[in-house]
Image (cartoon, rainbow, N blue to C red):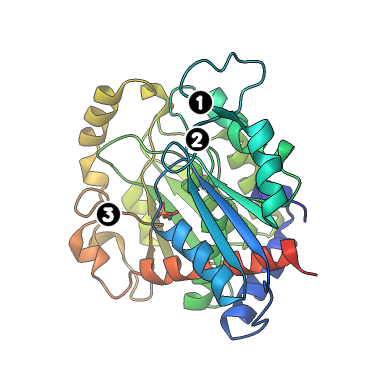
C-alpha cells in the first residue's frame, strides 16, 4: 500500500484485513507500532474528529503529528498546473508536498468538494495533486469524493455492534440539512457496507443521486458477496428491515451554485429527518459520521436513543486510522 486515497483502490478482502488489524490494535496489540514516526496533516477545512483521532492515534502508538491549517497558520495552496499565481495562493502543492515529505514519514490531507461542478468534484484534483507530488505515503482525511477513513470506522462499528456483517441490512438514508454538504461520506458508507458483504439500500428523494461510478462499484461488491443492492425513494419502507440506519445529508448537483434553491429543497423534504419511527428493530443501530445538526438531520429522541452508536463510530476513527498508518509505515 503506497497511499490511502480511495476504497476503490483496494479489494474487499484487503479492507477486511485492515478491520481485523484495527480490532487487534484496539485490544492492545502493536503498542509502539508508530514509534518515532511523524505524520503531517494538512487541513483545507474544519475538523473535530479527524484532526484529533489522527493525532491521538499517532501519540498512542509512539509517534507524533503536526497539523497545518491552509490559509490559517500556513500559506494558501494552489494545486492547478500552469496558473499565474498572482492572487491569494502563495505556494504551489508542487513545492509544498515534497517539502513536507522531507519532514514527515506520511502526509494526510482534508479537503471538501467545491459543490459547484460535479465533474470537477469527481476528478478530486486537489488530493490527486498531493498524491502526485508527495514522496511519502498520503492519507485521504476526506476529499471531494470519499472519506475512506470514515468508511472503515463505520464498518468496524457495525461489526462490533452486530457481529458478522455479511447479509446484514444496511440502509443509507438521505436527510435534510441547513446548507449544501458533500457526498464523500455517503460514498464511503456505501462502499464500506458493500465491501463488508451487507445488503445495501440507499434511500433518497429524486434528484439526489450519488456518483454513478461509486454506485456501480458498490453494486458489484454487494453482488459478489451474494448480497442485494437497491436504490429507493421510499425512506420508511427501506428502514422497516434495517439492521443499520445510516443517516447522511448531501446536496443535489441540480442546485450546485444556488444555495437558496438548495435550502428551499431541503425544507421541502423536512419530513426525511430521522427519528425513532425509523428505528424499527430493537437491535437496529443508528449511525451518523458527525457533526450532526440536531432536529434538522436527526431528532433529539433518535440521537439520545440507546440504539444510537455515533460516539462509538467516532472512537473507531482512531483505531482504524492506527491500522492504516501501521500498514503504510510499518518497518
Ligand atoms: N466525521 C468527521 O470527519 O468529523 P470531522 O469533520 O469533525 O473531522
On the question of residue 243 being in view, the answer is no
Mark 1 vs mark 3, CA separation in Å: 41 Å
> Which quarter of the rendering shows the C terminus?
bottom right
Expressed as whole percent of the image width and height from the top left, the position of residue 132 reads: 73, 36
Expressed as whole percent of the image width and height from the top left, the position of residue 309 reads: 37, 70
Q: Which residue is mark 3?
A: 274
Mark 3 lies on a secondary structure that is loop
Q: Which residue is mark 2?
A: 75
| Residue 171 falls left or right of residue 34 | left
Q: Nearer the viewer, residue 220 or 240?
A: 220
Q: Are marks 2 and 1 in contact (CB under 8 Å)?
A: yes
Expressed as whole percent of the image width and height from the top left, the position of residue 4 reads: 67, 52
Q: Which residue is mark 1?
A: 89
Which of the two discs, 2 and 1, labels the residue nearer the N terminus? 2
Question: Residue at 58% across / 66% down in the picture?
Answer: 64
Is 286 drawn above or below residue 107 in the view shown?
below
Amino acid at each position: 500500500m503506497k497511499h490511502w486515497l480511495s476504497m476503490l483502490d483496494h479489494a474487499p478482502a484487503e479492507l477486511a484485513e485492515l478491520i481485523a488489524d484495527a480490532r487487534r490494535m484496539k485490544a492492545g496489540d502493536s503498542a509502539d507500532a508508530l514509534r518515532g514516526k511523524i505524520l503531517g496533516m494538512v487541513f483545507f477545512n474544519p475538523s473535530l474528529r479527524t484532526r484529533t483521532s489522527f493525532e491521538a492515534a499517532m501519540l498512542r502508538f509512539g509517534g507524533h503529528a503536526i497539523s497545518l491549517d491552509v490559509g490559517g497558520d500556513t500559506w494558501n495552496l494552489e494545486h492547478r498546473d500552469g496558473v499565474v499565481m498572482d492572487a491569494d495562493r502563495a505556494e504551489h502543492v508542487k513545492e509544498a508536498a515534497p517539502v513536507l515529505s522531507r519532514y514527515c514519514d506520511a502526509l494526510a490531507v482534508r479537503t471538501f468538494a467545491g459543490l459547484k461542478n460535479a465533474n470537477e468534484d469527481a476528478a478530486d484534483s486537489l488530493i490527486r495533486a498531493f498524491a502526485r507530488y508527495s514522496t511519502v505515503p498520503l492519507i485521504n482525511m476526506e476529499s471531494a469524493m470519499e472519506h475512506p477513513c470514515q468508511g472503515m470506522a463505520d464498518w468496524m462499528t457495525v461489526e462490533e455492534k452486530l457481529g458478522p456483517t455479511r447479509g446484514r441490512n444496511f440502509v443509507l438514508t438521505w436527510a435534510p440539512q441547513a446548507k449544501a454538504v458533500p457526498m464523500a461520506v455517503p460514498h464511503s458508507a456505501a462502499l464500506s457496507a458493500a465491501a463488508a458483504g451487507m445488503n445495501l439500500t440507499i434511500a433518497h428523494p429524486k434528484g439526489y443521486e450519488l456518483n454513478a461510478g461509486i454506485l456501480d462499484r458498490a453494486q458489484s461488491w454487494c453482488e459478489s458477496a451474494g448480497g442485494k443492492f437497491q436504490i429507493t425513494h421510499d425512506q420508511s419502507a427501506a428502514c422497516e428491515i434495517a439492521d443499520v440506519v445510516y443517516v447522511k445529508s448531501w446536496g443535489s448537483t441540480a442546485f450546485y451554485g444556488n444555495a437558496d434553491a438548495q435550502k428551499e429543497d431541503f425544507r421541502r423534504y423536512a419530513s426525511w429527518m430521522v427519528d425513532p419511527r425509523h428505528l424499527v428493530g430493537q437491535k437496529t443501530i443508528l449511525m451518523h459520521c458527525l457533526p450532526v445538526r440536531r432536529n434538522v438531520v436527526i431528532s433529539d429522541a433518535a440521537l439520545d436513543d440507546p440504539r444510537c452508536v455515533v460516539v462509538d463510530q467516532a472512537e473507531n476513527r482512531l483505531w482504524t486510522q492506527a491500522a492504516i498508518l501501521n500498514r503504510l509505515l510499518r518497518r
